[in-house]
Amino acid sequence: MKNLLIISPYFPPVNAADMQRVRMSLPYFAAHGWNVEVVMVDEQYVDMAIDPLLLQSIPGNIKIHKVKAFHKRWTSKLGLGSIALRSLWFYRRKVNRLLRDRKFDLIYFSTTQFPVCILGAYWKKRFGIPYVIDMQDPWHSDYYRDKPRAEQPPKYWFSYRLNKYLEPIAIKNADGLISVSEGYIDDLKNRYPVIKNRPLAVITFGAFEPDMYIARENQAKFTSLLDDRFINVVYVGRGGTDMYRAIAPVFEALQKGLGNLENDFFTRLKFYFIGTSYAPAGQGKPTILPLAQQYGTADHVVEITDRISYYHTLLTLQQANAVFIPGSDDPQYTASKIYPYLLTQKPLLAVFNKKSSAISILREYGVKHVYDYESVTAAAINSFFSQLAHGDPEPPVYNQEAISKYSAQQMTVNQCRLFNQVLNRESGIENQESRQKKN
């Protein structure tokens, strides 16, 4: 068995999107030759929602190490709230001890808290251990550079410059890269040609069916957010103006349907957009409701800006009559959250940028109503509405090959395959260097 050390600042019971790949892979690593230990930031230093139910999916034999972080109440005075920056020094100290005390074959950074990844280059130089970075999002990106300030993330000026400096340190020295998007890897190869011959793989998040059982078994703990007097179509996830091109055609079709007084189906239709803001509870500003108001459909759209817990999300999707997934106008947006929607086996409508990998994945599954926002038509949206109006007698039947291909178990196999490639490459390089010294 080989030993893998995973660096994941956010980890259960913290409810953060970027720890989901690790959490869903943990049950399967050992079967494919890897013993795993995880180093996380102690949840008491994290200002994100806590969801204890997430711990039910963590195998009991996984060793979890916790590190401290500087308290945000002090670092925020310097403008530093990032958990990556607040925990960096503690990560260095803790992992130094672990690497001195036992043998690890590989270090795996799976997080969007990218500044911690620069420690990979340090540990590689000091201990000779290769490392892999999981690019779930772009690290240094120009996407928001030309956007109005109101649409830029908080402290964008600072983070843009910091990322521009830190990214090359980590990426140039990485021994392998995993990404949820081919576009992310292409951008990095263009920026850093030195990585072109290193192991690289596009691995999306996977479908983790045990989560659906956990949600159902704990449904009594959650308050229903839906009004069962209506036909409820649900989306749970962030909002934003970058999704307008995907949502607008749906609101336009809804507007026209409401204008048809002979069809009362549309009067019973309600769209829910839940958890659309990253702001603290009660402080989020609606971003979807203003668009609904433009189309005169606000009475049939509910936006709840507050985030809800992961299992509350899964239960709400299961309680819906149908589900909706709008994509960003960013062509590299992959929407890893598509898998819980698929697991509900509810009627599904999805509208994405035509370059998004989500479209091809959904079509592999056999989803009927998946479109790109450049070519979607009113007739296409109305065909989805017609499906809801008449009701399908059976839940959708998806392609079994796609179900297996995109399962969390198969995605773990793909990760282990890349890890082995990294070790084989390192072994080959060492053997070559040894032969050169002998000659």
Image (cartoon, rainbow, N blue to C red):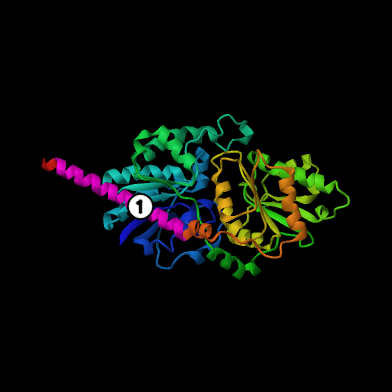
Quadrant of the rendered structure where residue 411 is?
A: bottom left
Give the image location of residue 141, x and y in percent.
Answer: 50, 35
Q: In this rendering, does residue 417 appear at all?
A: yes
Residue at 63%, 39% in the rendered image = 242
Looking at the picture, does residue 115 appear above or below residue 387? above
Image quadrant where one finds the N terminus: bottom left
Compared with residue 151, is residue 212 higher up or lower down, i.e. above or below?
below
Q: Main secondary structure of the magenta part?
A: helix
Region in magenta: 409-436
Relative to 217, does residue 326 appear above or below in the rendering?
Answer: above
Q: In the image, is residue 327 part of the stretch drawn in magenta?
A: no
Left or right relative to 288: residue 144: left
Can I make out residue 52 in this image? no
Q: Residue at x 55, y 30 (%)?
A: 145
- Residue pushed farthest right? 261
Task: Quickly name the residue at label 1.
Answer: 419
Q: Nearer the viewer, residue 365 or 196?
A: 365
User: Which residue is painted at 47% across and 36% down in the image?
Assistant: 140
**How far across and down, in percent of the image, does residue 297 sit?**
79, 46
Q: Position of residue 192 (x, y in %)?
A: 38, 34
Residue plotted at (79% across, 61% down): 229
For disc 1, the neighbor class at 10 Å (few under 14, some 14 to 19, many from 20) is many
Position of the C terminus by quadrant: top left
Three-letter code for the amino acid on which mark 1 is drawn: Phe
Name the secondary structure under disc 1.
Answer: helix
185 and 361: which is toward the camera? 361
Q: Residue furthest top?
A: 146
Say whether residue 430 is magenta: yes
